[in-house]
Amino acid sequence: AGDSVTNPDLRSFYFQSPSIEDAESWTKALLTDRHQSLKDETDAYKQVCESFPLQLANCSQMIDAAEAKAEEMEREAYNVRSASEEGRRKVVSAVREMLERRCWETKDPSKRKDDKPQGSHFFG
């Protein structure tokens, strides 16, 4: 039953049965049902408590796997950036070399042409 301090919204109720035997069987049924419900809840709580370490271990393994994958992806991204930077340096070096070298120069000095045109080639 409710009181003004514990639970003011809970009201007292009365149960009336045709006989004392009916009242006792109803009381026994209510108490048995309540006891069984509490027992079921206790068992369910125990199962949750027993499975918690396994669930925690599974979560920990999933976190470790995700962290390892993230680290692997970071390493792969670093390798890609490094390879890309190396490729960029090679391209810049090749372009610089080509721009700095004159088109008509060759590595063999005997085949090299002079910078200045010779007079016999021009009319004049």
Image (cartoon, rainbow, N blue to C red):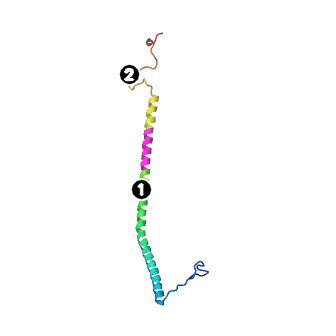
In the rendered image, the quadrant that contains the N terminus is: bottom right
Q: Give x and y (percent) for residue 21.
A: 46, 89
Depth check, front residue: 111 or 49? 49
Q: Quadrant of residue 95?
A: top left
In front: mark 2 or mark 1?
Answer: 1
Majority secondary structure in the magenta region? helix
Question: Which residue is situated farthest in the front direction here?
Answer: 18
Q: SS at mark 2?
A: helix
Q: Residue at x 43, y 13 (%)?
A: 121
Q: Dot 2 corresponds to which residue?
A: 111
Q: Answer whether residue 77 is magenta in the image.
A: yes
Most extreme residue toward the right is 4
**Residue at horizontal 41%, vertical 52%?**
72
Point out residue 44 in the picture as x, y percentages from the top left corner: 43, 73
Q: Residues within 10 Å of mark 1 (few under 14, many from 20)?
A: few
Residue 56 painted magenta:
no
Amino acid at pointer 2: Lys
> Do residues under tags 2 and 1 come within 8 Å of each other at their CB atoms?
no
Residue 58 in the image: x percent, y percent? Answer: 41, 64
Question: The magenta stretch spans which residues?
Answer: 75-88
Q: Is residue 78 above or below residue 26?
A: above
Residue at image position (41%, 58%) is: 65
What separation in Å lies between label 2 and label 1 (alpha carbons)?
60 Å
Task: Residue type at mark 1: give it.
Answer: Ala
The label on residue 102 is none
Q: Residue lying at the far bottom in this picture: please name it.
A: 20
Graded by Cα atoms within 10 Å as few (under 14), some (14 to 19) or many (20 or more), the crowding at tag 2 reads: few
Q: Which mark is residue 68?
A: 1
Against 74, is 119 above or below? Answer: above
Residue under the image location 46 percent in, 87 percent down = 22
Question: Quadrant of residue 89 in the image?
Answer: top left
